[in-house]
Image: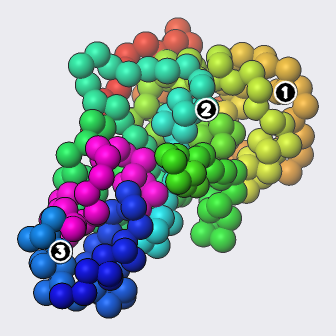
Amino acid sequence: MDKLKIEQVPDGVVVNRAWLKEKDINSALVDYYLRKGYLERVAYGAYRRPGSPLKWQHLVYSLQVLGFSVHIGGRSALELKGFAHYLPFNKKQRVHLFRENKLPGWLFKTKIDAEFVEHTRKLFKNNENNLGLTTILFGSWDWKINVASPERAILEMMSDVPNKESFHMVDVMMESATTLRPEVINTLLEKCNNIKVKRLFLWFSEKHGHPWFERLELDHVDLGKGKRVVQKGGKLDPKYLITVPNDNNDRQEQPIF
């Protein structure tokens, strides 16, 4: 058996059998590498070379290597950028992943000290789905992992209000959002196709009154027409025509599922 072929598997990266087959590593060779300990199974259909403990960053980068269009977004991206942090006591860290194509089942069966929450990319048209994305570096390899900028991440978080994210948690994040870039916000708001999210963002922005809010140019931002129900049983904001909590501070943390 050809041991040299195992060197094609990048150190730290999790791959599947399809990827291995492309590298001329067939099923018999995969099974041989597993028996010899040159490969280890991290979940059914997913493998890596033995190494340091598996972290969620390994898995996200591996998805990129395997060709998935995916990025860390929403609350997770904001926490990575140093915004207000919230982690329920005695619960795993939740990593919010936004994707175009469905993520593989093995991702959710790996044994790591975190859990992934899957979202679809739906705020922008397909050809604009990379707007507001940047990268963070991970590990000694300086892997570039895709992550939403704070400006995009806060919009992604608002898209889940009130079902998967609460008004209160968005309020906490917006209170910390003192350094958002108005030019980036303008572009995202102009391209965003979710009326509720745009109105909600402006409502929160006006509430907190950060200096960047006065520098927004909204002439080309489509806010739609008519009322939008965001909070059932809430009060109607007369300016943005969305329903918000009666006390402007919903402190009930919503379940993720």
* Residue beneath disc 3: 33
Residue 252 percent coordinates (x, y): 37, 16
Q: 138 or 165, which lies in front?
A: 138
Q: Quickly name the residue at label 2.
A: 81
Mark 3 vs mark 2, foreground winner is: 3
Q: Amino acid at mark 2?
A: Lys
Q: Is 12 on the left-hand or right-hand side of 197?
A: left
Q: Nearer the viewer, residue 10 or 156?
A: 10
Residue nearest the viewer, comparing 92 with 231: 92
The answer to which quarter of the image holds residue 36 is bottom left
Q: Earlier in the sequence, mark 1 or mark 3?
A: 3
Residue 27 % position (x, y)? 17, 85
**Could you say whether the residue bearing mark 2 is in a helix, strand or loop?**
loop
Q: Is residue 63 left or right of residue 6?
A: right
Q: Is residue 211 left or right of residue 28?
A: right
Which residue is label 1 attached to? Answer: 212
Range covered by the magenta-colored residues: 38-62
Query: Which three-letter amino acid code belongs to the residue tagged 3?
Result: Tyr
Q: Residue at x 82, y 27 (%)?
A: 213
Residue 91's quadrant in the figure?
Answer: top left
Upstream in sequence: badge 3 or badge 2: 3
